[in-house]
Image (cartoon, grey):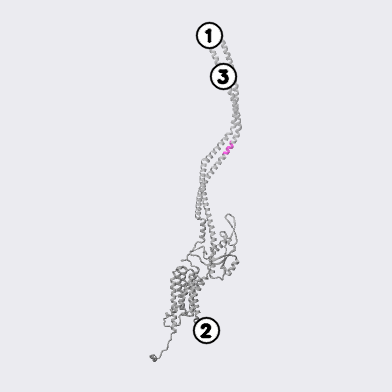
């Protein structure tokens, strides 16, 4: 223990040459610069990082300056047959969409992608050349193509990381897995939605066509109903005005034909009588002709006699002289007149008889024709009677059929009327169907190809996140500097008090006040701290801090350095070597509480709850407000908290100085009374 105490004291009091002291002071001054410079310059911002695009579902108002970790893509996908709408078949590989998205930065944020083979990727992952390897399986295209079919199949993308990599890399790999899944899901969902919308458009068109067809059919059915109504009315009219009278007429025809058939049975007998009478007439005419011939002959004879008489009378008239001439002439004139009249009458009779003979001859001819016709009629009458019998039988059948037809027509008219009513109802139902089909068609929105694409995009990405960094987005170097500069100044203050003591014994033994002793001892350390802060300001220039905030950043750095030096003076003055150990311990706690290594969401609440009570966390908060371009609302409170911690460090130094002074006071023993009086 004695050796350990001596070693500890030797560490505080070991002599140092003037040159070594100057070198040590110089190193202490540049220690914060070295720490901050190395941390900022060690950060690699690969070429093209500024052009890296974010997630397609995220829009950002700030430029992307995130670093890109190297990663590899291994594509084992195989071609599949794709059938176009026209029936042609071609080869396609859908994984090209994913590889294109990765290599052009659309997906897989935070990584710079290289398309390579499986062995190169595996070797690169093992050697650290690649932070992650994504392997696209051989069934990716076939699984992609199965979406929208009756048997969809899921495909699995394999994401490999090195277990020995950093925590941040692991977290990026985890985010990469989700990002790739979301990217592929978006592509598949977008394609599925586009196909579905196209199918909806087809259904809409089909429904519209079906509605039009149903409406047309309804019109036809309604027309058919009207026709059925007209048919029923026509059938009824046909029954009432045609079939009934026709049936009555057919029945009357059947009755008349039956009677005619009965009467026709006597026609042959009458025909025979007509033939006999005609024959008798012919015989009478023959007899009359003979008589008339005789009379004609007799008439000729009378005429001859009359001629002879006239001759005799003429002779007598000539020979009778006895008679007076007047008498004879009178008598002769009378005889001559009488004889002339007889001759004229006889000639007239003769002529009439000749004419009668000619008429009788013609009558004979007519009688012969009548006899022949009567004979022919008599021959045809049996056939006529048979046909009339058959017609009567047919008329009876016709009457029976007409009765049945009339009944059937009445039933048909009733059925046609019922059919008309049913068709009208069917037309109404068909119209309702057409209306509902049209409503269904109208209820399906009509989307143009551009609208289908937009809707597919909205369905796959219904929400976009708008990331806006107030005051501009910081560069990665500025974000790192906001953390490293307070850390470097803390270690710079620690280095200062590796070289300096909180205060000298001579100062403690002086008659100056304790406050003056402490402040006087603090002045050199504070000066070195301010120089450290001024030197570290070079880093602020290097990281491109907004010129409007550069002066505030320098002043805040000077405040941090002064506070940290004051705190270290108090800790080391009060605790000695233990104060230095406590400084390092506080540094670790403060880094954890500031959530600069791990996000606050994954940092233990035991540390995050102390963030507002620790100087380094307040310093980081204030400097972040200045360097990252965000709101400076937290800057006054951070500066005030640092000032409080500076006062705390001053108070600790005052307590330590007071305690040391009280320990160094020499208490003299009391003098005897006599000597005291003499004195």
Res. 349 mark = 3
Magenta: main secondary structure: helix
SS for dot 2:
helix
Choose between 644 and 38: the one closer to the eye.
38
Residue at numbered disc 1: 325
Position above or below: 70 against 22: above
Choose between 535 and 247: the one closer to the eye.
535
Position above or below: 520 against 197: below
SS for dot 1:
helix
Q: Where is residue 309 in the image (x, y as percent from the top left)?
A: 57, 13
Image quadrant for the C terminus?
Answer: bottom left
**Badge 3: how crowded within 10 Å, few (<14), some, or many (20+)?**
some
Q: Earlier in the sequence, mark 3 or mark 2?
A: 2
Q: Earlier in the sequence, mark 2 or mark 1?
A: 2
Mark 3 and mark 1 residues within 8 Å of each other at the beta carbon? no
Q: Which residue lies furthest to the left in this view?
A: 677
Note whether residue 551 is visible: yes
Q: Distance between the residues labelled 3 and 1?
A: 35 Å
Stretch of the chain drawn in magenta: 388-395
**Badge 2: how crowded within 10 Å, few (<14), some, or many (20+)?**
few
Q: Where is residue 392 in the image (x, y as percent from the top left)?
A: 57, 37
Position above or below: 404 against 112: above
Q: Position of residue 247 (x, y in %)?
A: 54, 40
Mark 2 and mark 1 residues within 8 Å of each other at the beta carbon? no
SS for dot 3:
helix
**Badge 1: how crowded within 10 Å, few (<14), some, or many (20+)?**
few
Residue at numbered disc 2: 3
Q: Earlier in the sequence, mark 3 or mark 1?
A: 1
Q: Distance between the residues labelled 3 and 2?
A: 213 Å
Foreground mark, 2 or 1, reads 2
Choose between 649 and 364: the one closer to the eye.
649
């Amino acid at each position: 223990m004695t050796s350990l105490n001596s070693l500890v004291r030797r560490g505080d009091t070991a002599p140092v040459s003037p040159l070594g002291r100057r070198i040590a002071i110089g190193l202490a001054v540049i220690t914060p610069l070295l720490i901050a410079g190395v941390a900022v310059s060690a950060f690699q911002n690969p070429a093209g990082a500024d052009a890296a695009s974010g997630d397609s579902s995220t829009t950002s108002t700030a430029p992307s300056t995130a670093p890109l970790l190297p990663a590899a893509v291994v594509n084992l996908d195989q071609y599949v047959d794709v059938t176009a709408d026209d029936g042609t078949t071609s080869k396609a590989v859908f994984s090209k969409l994913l590889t294109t998205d990765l290599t052009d930065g659309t997906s897989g944020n935070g990584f710079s992608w290289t398309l390579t083979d499986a062995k190169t990727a595996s070797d690169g992952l093992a050697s650290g050349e690649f932070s992650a390897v994504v392997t696209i399986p051989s069934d990716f295209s076939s699984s992609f193509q199965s979406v929208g079919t009756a048997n969809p199949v899921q495909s699995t993308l394999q994401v490999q990381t090195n277990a020995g990599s950093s925590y941040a890399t692991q977290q990026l790999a985890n985010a990469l897995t989700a990002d790739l899944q979301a990217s592929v899901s978006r592509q598949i969902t977008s394609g599925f939605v586009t196909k579905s919308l196209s199918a909806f458009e087809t259904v809409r068109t089909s429904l519209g066509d079906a509605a039009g067809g149903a409406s047309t059919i309804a019109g036809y059915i309604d027309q058919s109903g009207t026709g059925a109504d007209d048919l029923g009315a026509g059938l009824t009219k046909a029954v009432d005005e045609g079939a009934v009278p026709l049936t009555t007429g057919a029945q009357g025809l059947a009755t008349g034909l039956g009677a005619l058939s009965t009467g026709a049975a006597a026609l042959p007998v009458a025909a025979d009588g007509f033939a006999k009478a005609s024959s008798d007439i012919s015989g009478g005419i023959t007899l009359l002709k003979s008589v008339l011939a005789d009379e004609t002959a007799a008439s000729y004879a009378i005429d001859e006699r009359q001629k002879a008489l006239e001759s005799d009378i003429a002779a007598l008239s000539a020979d009778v002289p006895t008679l007076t001439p007047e008498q004879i002439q009178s008598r002769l004139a009378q005889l001559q007149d009488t004889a002339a009249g007889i001759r004229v009458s006889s000639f007239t009779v003769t002529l009439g008889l000749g004419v009668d003979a000619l008429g009788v001859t013609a009558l004979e001819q007519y009688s012969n024709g009548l006899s022949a016709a009567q004979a022919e009629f008599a021959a045809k009458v049996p056939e006529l009677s048979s046909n009339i019998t058959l017609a009567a039988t047919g008329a009876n059948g016709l009457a029976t059929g007409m009765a049945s037809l009339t009944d059937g027509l009445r039933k048909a008219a009733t059925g046609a009327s019922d059919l008309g009513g049913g068709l009208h109802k069917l037309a109404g139902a068909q119209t309702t169907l057409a209306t509902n089909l049209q409503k269904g068609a109208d209820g399906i929105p009509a989307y143009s190809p551009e609208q289908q694409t937009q809707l597919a995009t909205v369905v796959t990405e219904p929400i976009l996140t708008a990331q806006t960094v107030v005051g501009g987005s910081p560069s990665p170097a500025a974000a790192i500097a906001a953390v490293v500069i307070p850390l470097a100044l803390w270690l710079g203050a620690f280095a200062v008090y590796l070289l300096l003591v909180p205060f000298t014994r001579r100062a403690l033994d002086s008659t100056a006040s304790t406050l003056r002793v402490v402040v006087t001892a603090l002045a050199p350390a504070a000066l070195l701290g301010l120089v450290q802060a001024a030197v570290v300001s070079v880093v602020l220039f290097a990281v491109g801090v907004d010129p409007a905030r550069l002066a505030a950043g320098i002043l805040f750095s000077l405040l941090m350095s002064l506070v940290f030096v004051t705190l270290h003076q108090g800790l080391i003055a009060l605790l000695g070597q233990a104060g230095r150990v406590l400084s390092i311990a506080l540094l670790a706690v403060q880094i954890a509480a500031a959530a600069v290594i791990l996000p606050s969401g994954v940092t233990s609440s035991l540390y995050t709850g102390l963030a507002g009570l620790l100087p380094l966390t307040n310093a980081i908060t204030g400097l972040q407000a200045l360097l990252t371009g965000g709101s400076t609302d937290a800057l006054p409170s951070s500066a005030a908290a640092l000032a409080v911690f500076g006062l705390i460090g001053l108070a600790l130094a005052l307590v330590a100085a007071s305690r040391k002074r009280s320990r160094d006071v020499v208490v003299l023993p009391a003098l005897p009374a006599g000597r005291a009086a003499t004195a």
